Image: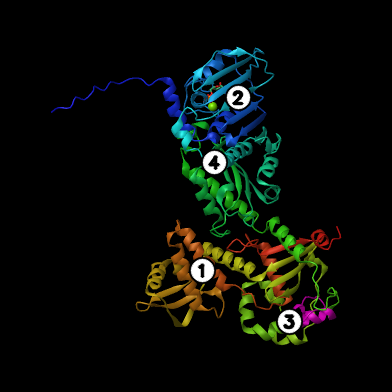
Amino acid sequence: MRIKIPTMRIRHLPENLINQIAAGEVLERPAAAIKEMCENSLDAGASQIDVRIEDGGKSLIMIDDNGCGMAREDLVAALERHATSKLPDDDLLNIRYLGFRGEALPSIAAVSRMMINTHDQDSGDSWSIRINGGVKENPIPCAHPKGTHIEVRDIFYATPARLKFQKSARSEYMAIKDTLLRLALAHHDVGFSLTHEGKKAFSYPAVLEPQSRLSDVLGKEFGKNIMPIEVEREGITLTGYAGLPTYHRANAQQQYLFVNGRPVKDKLLNGCVRAAYADVLARDRHAVMALFLNVPPTLVDVNVHPAKTEVRFQDPQLIRSMIISSLKHAIHEHGTHVSTAVSTSAIDKLGRSAPMRSHSGSYYSATPSNYSPATQHISNSAEQQNHLAETAFDTFAPAQMSWSDNIAPSARAEAPPTAAIQDQQPVQISEQDTHFPLGAARAQIHENYIISQTQNGMIVVDQHAAHERLVYEKFKKQIQESGIIKQGMLTPEIIELEESETIRLLDYQEHLAEMGLEIESFGPSAISVQAIPALLGDKPKISKLIQDLASEITERATAQGLEERLNAILSTMACHGSIRSGRRMNVEEMNALLRQMEETPLSGQCNHGRPTYVTLTLSDIETLFGRK
Ligand code: ADP
Ligand code: MG
C-alpha cells in the first residue's frame, strides 16, 4: 500500500516568527537583552544609563537613558526587523556603532511586553509605543522629558520553551551585573547604575579618566596595583591596565578585553595572558586586567556572532604579539614591585595577633635582655652583628663561597676572608644604605627572613624566594647571551628513576643540554648526569633535582607551549640553585642580595608568583601599635 505524502510547499515565515527565532539566537537571557538595549543607549549618545530590574530581569527590565531619542517614524521603524539607523553606507566592513544588525529591538519585542517612551531631540516631541509579543500598537504622544525609557516585562513569555530554561533570578542578576560592569569599564565617560528589586547594586558616575572607572569597578586595591599599558602598531592601539603579578585572583573572570569599545569574550586574551605571566604567576592563579584594543574597523570583523561577543581579526598574530609583548614589557618594568595587597594583608594578620604577651604575662620589652632565645639575633647591635658573622662562618663556610659567586662581585670583594671573620670589626651600616629602595639589611630571623630598614619603614624579604628569582633571571640571561654555563662532573652521577620518568626525561635530553644539564640513558630505569649548570653551585643535590624535573615534566606534559614547559624546567633548576631557607647569612651577603634584587627584573615575585618581600611603612607600623 502506498502512503500518500502531503506535498511540501515553501512558504515565507511570518515576520514575528523570524523575530522569535532571532531572539532565541541573540537573546539567550535577560542579560543579553539588557546589553543590546544599553548599547543602543550608548549609540544614541547617552551620558547616563540607569537599569532597574525585578526578579533577575525575568519579570521586569527598565532602562532609562538621556540620549538623542527617536522621532515618531523612527520609533515605528526601529521595531521592524533589520531597520537600523547605524549602517548609513551599507558597508559591513566598516562598523563604528555598537549596533548594526537592526534586530535587537524587534527580537526583544517579539518575546515580551514592551513599552518605549522617547523624546525626539530634534523635533522636541515625545512618543510612546506599546508592543506585546510582537504585536505593535500605534504610537501616541506622551510627556517624556529627555532620552528614552524602555520597559520590558515578562521576557520570553511568548516563547514558552525558552521560558522553561531560564535560570534562577540570582544567576540572571549576576549575569546582568557582569554585563553592565563590562559596559561600564568600556565607557568610563558614561554613568551607569543598576537597581535590583529596589536596591542599588551599583552606581558609577561618569568620569574623565578610565583609571577612576577601573578602581570603581574592579576595586580600589586594583587601582593601586596596576601597570599601565600603552602601545601602538600599524594603526592599532592597545591601552589599559594590567595588575601586578603579585595581585592575582583564583579565576580569570577579571580579565577584560574591549575591542573598539565592545566587551569581547575571546580565548585570544586568555592565551596571551597565560604566556605573558607564565614566569611570574602560579598556574592556578590569574592576573587581573582591562585592555582596550582599538583596531581600524576594516581590520576586524565583529559580525561573527549575533551577540557580537566574538570578533575576528584580520591579523590575529599581530594582535597576539602586541598583547603579549606589552604585558611582558610592563611586567618587566614593574617586576620589582610587590602588590600593596601583600602589605595590607600582612598588616591585617599582624593586627589580629598583636599585642603579644610573654609567658610571664607581661608585654615584651624592647630591651635585648628580655628577648626570648628564639629571637636572639633580631638586633643591630655590634655584638649581634659579630655573632651573625661567626655563625655564618661556622655553619656554611664552603657552600657560602659558591653562593657568594652568584651574588654581586662587589659583595665578594668586600666580604672578609673567611678565616679572618673572628677578628672582623662589627659591620657598620651607613645611613646611606637605607636610601636604597630595599634598604639596609639589619638582621636575619628564622634563618630565612631578612629584615631591612628603609627610609620610611621596613622590609621583610623571603631569602629563598628572592634568590630563586635571581638565579632564574640569570639562567635566562645566560641562555640569551651565550648559553648556560656548564660544569662537568668528575664522575657522572647515576640516578635511579621510574622507567616512565626515565623515558620522559630523555625526551627532553636536548633541551636539558641547552640548559646546561647533560644527561644520558643508563639502562631502562636510570640516567647518568654528565654536567650541570654552573649556577647550581658546588654541591647541589642532583638526585633531588632530577626527580623534581621528572615530576615537573610529567605535570606539564599537557601544558600548551614548549616555551612554557622549558621555563618550568628552568624555574625548577633555579629553585635548586638558590639559597635554601635555613641558611644563615651575614650582613654583607644580605645587602648584596638586596642590591641584586633591585637590579633584577621581576624580583618582586618568586617564580611561582609569591611575593619575595613585604613592605611595612612607618605609618603601617604606627597603625599596628595604635599610634594612628
Ligand atoms: P541596531 O542597534 O542594530 O540598529 P536595534 O534593533 O538595536 O538595532 O535598534 C534599532 C534602531 O532603534 C536603532 O538603529 C536606533 O535608531 C533606534 N534605537 C534603539 N534604541 C534607542 C535608544 N535608546 N535611543 C535612540 N534610538 C534608539
Ligand atoms: Mg542595537
Q: Which residue is mark 1?
A: 484
Q: Which residue is mark 4?
A: 168
Q: Amino acid at mark 3?
A: Ala
Secondary-structure class at tag 2:
strand
Identify the image quadrant of residue 202. top right
Q: Give the mark nearest the N terminus, 4 or 3.
A: 4
Packing grade of label 1 (10 A; few <14, some 14-19, many >=20) is: many
Q: CA gap, disc 4 to disc 1? A: 57 Å
- Please identify, in this view, whether the residue under mark 2 or under mark 4 is nearer the observer: 4
Task: Tell me whether the residue at label 4 lies in contact with that at label 3, contact meaning CB atoms closer than 8 angstroms.
Answer: no
Q: CA gap, disc 4 to disc 3? A: 66 Å
Q: Amino acid at mark 4?
A: Ser
Task: Name the image colouring.
Answer: rainbow
Residue 89, above or below 513: above
Range drawn in magenta: 369-387
- Please identify, in this view, whether the residue under mark 1 or under mark 2 is nearer the observer: 2
Q: CA gap, disc 1 to disc 2? A: 66 Å
- Please identify, in this view, whether the residue under mark 2 or under mark 3 is nearer the observer: 2
Residue nearer the viewer, 249 or 533: 249
Q: At 58% across and 50% down in the image, what residue appears? A: 327
Packing grade of label 2 (10 A; few <14, some 14-19, many >=20) is: some
Q: Which quarter of the rendering shows the N terminus?
A: top left
369 vs 70, left or right, is right
Packing grade of label 4 (10 A; few <14, some 14-19, many >=20) is: few
Secondary-structure class at tag 4:
loop
Q: Amino acid at mark 1?
A: Ile
Q: At 43% across and 28% down in the image, what residue appears? A: 21
User: Tag on residue 150?
Assistant: 2
